[in-house]
Amino acid sequence: MEISFNTPALLFPAITLLLLAYTNRFLAIANLIRKLHDEYISGKKTAQLLAQLHNLKKRINYIRQMQALGVLSFLCCVVCMFSIYKDWTKAAEYIFAASLLSLLASLIISLVEIFLSTRALELELSDIEELEKTNFFSGLMSNKDKKES
């Protein structure tokens, strides 16, 4: 495989945008944790609130791992470019592979965190009684009944 400066440089914008997205997720979750913490302190200690806080704690840890692996990927790209500059071709190939693997791991953890975030939304919606009683098919049936009358 022929590796040039352009090869690791192609990852720079992708990694930068990914880190920006991770930071935005972190900030949104941090604000939510602060809000829920205030509710907890004010005495609203419900099971749902505790479940949400537990979920958010896991998500923050995943986001930290995602960010760390993203930064590692970025650093590997820089070291890879330095290796290319010094004409250390074999080292550059291995370092670029490490960059790709850390980026892949970061994306996999991001996928896990997305599944956790949907679980958090399910927790949020679980207290709405009407959503528990209806489902997609019963909603269709009630609309069909309304049209017939």
Image (tube, helix red, strand yellow):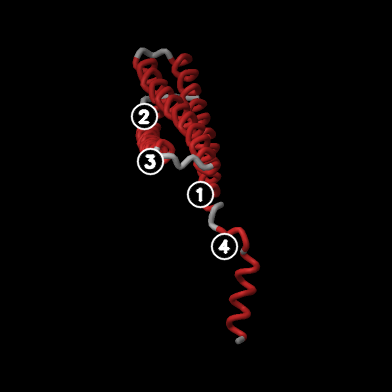
**x, y percentage for residue 50?**
52, 38
Badge 1 vs badge 3, beta-carbon distance below 8 Å: no
Decide if residue 119 is on the left or right side of residue 79. right
Res. 124 mark: 1
Name the kind of residue labelled 4 in the image: Glu
- Secondary element under disc 2, as helix, strand or loop, is helix
What is the C-alpha distance between the residues marked 2 and 1? Answer: 42 Å
- Residue at 52%, 34% (x, y): give it: 54
Check disc 1 and report its element: helix, strand or loop.
helix
Q: Amino acid at mark 3?
A: Lys
Q: Earlier in the sequence, mark 2 or mark 1?
A: 2
The residue to which callout 4 is attached is 130
Q: Which residue is mark 2?
A: 9
Residue placed at 64% from the left, 68% from the top?
A: 138
Q: Position of residue 15 (x, y in %)?
A: 39, 33
Residue type pointed to by label 1: Glu
Please name the amino acid that badge 2 sits on.
Answer: Ala
